[in-house]
Image (spheres, rainbow, N blue to C red):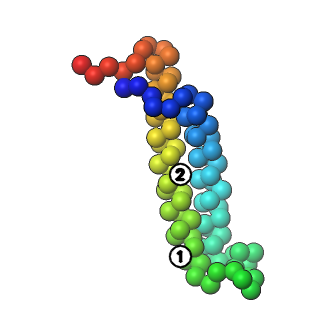
Amino acid sequence: MKPVVGAMQAWSCVVISFFAIIILSVIGGLYRSRHHEFVGGVEDPENTGEVSTTIFTAVLVYVAFLVCCGFQGILHMRENRRGAIALR
C-alpha cells in the first residue's frame, strides 16, 4: 500500500490534529461545566450542552484525522525502511 499524501503533510496533520484535540477538549469541557468565562456574558449561548456536544463532535473529526494521517506517516516510514507494502 502506498501513501496518498507526502510525509511532511502527513506529520504536519498529526501535530495539528493532536493540539486541536487538546484545545477543543478543554474548551468543550469548559462549556459543559458552564464556566463563567464562557457563559456569563449577555451574548453567550444559553444551551451550553449543545455547544459542548458540537465541540466534542469536532474533536472526533480531529481524532479521525490523527489516525488517518498517522497511518500515512507510518506508511512513509515503512516505505523508506523496507520498501512499499505489497499485496500478493
| In the displayed structure image, the side of residue 19 where residue 56 appears, left or right | left
| In the displayed structure image, the side of residue 74 where residue 85 appears, left or right | left
Residue 79 image label: none
Occupied quadrant, residue 13: top right
Q: Position of residue 69 (x, y in %)?
A: 50, 38
| In the displayed structure image, the side of residue 18 where residue 68 appears, left or right | left
Name the residue beneath numbered marker 1.
50
Type of amino acid at the residue the image marks with label 2: Tyr
Instruction: Look at 48% across and 14% down and name the residue there.
Output: 81
Image quarter where the N terminus lies is top left
Mark 2 crowdedness (10 Å alpha carbons): few <14, some 14-19, many ≥20: many
Figure check: 57 above or below 49: above
Figure check: 11 above or below 66: above
Query: What is the tally of numbered marks visible in this picture?
Result: 2
Image quarter where the C terminus lies is top left
Instruction: Look at 55% across and 34% down and name the residue there.
Output: 10
Secondary structure under the numbered disc 2 in the rendered image: helix
Distance, label 2 to label 1, CA atoms, is 19 Å
Name the residue beneath numbered marker 2.
62
Instruction: Look at 50% across and 50% down and name the residue there.
Output: 63
Mark 1 crowdedness (10 Å alpha carbons): few <14, some 14-19, many ≥20: few
Q: Position of residue 5 (x, y in %)?
A: 50, 32
Secondary structure under the numbered disc 1 in the rendered image: helix
Q: Position of residue 67 (x, y in %)?
A: 47, 42
Residue lying farthest to the top in this orientation: 82
Instruction: Look at 46% across and 19% down and name the residue there.
Output: 79
Closer to the N terminus: mark 2 or mark 1? 1
Figure check: 74 above or below 65: above
Type of amino acid at the residue the image marks with label 1: Glu
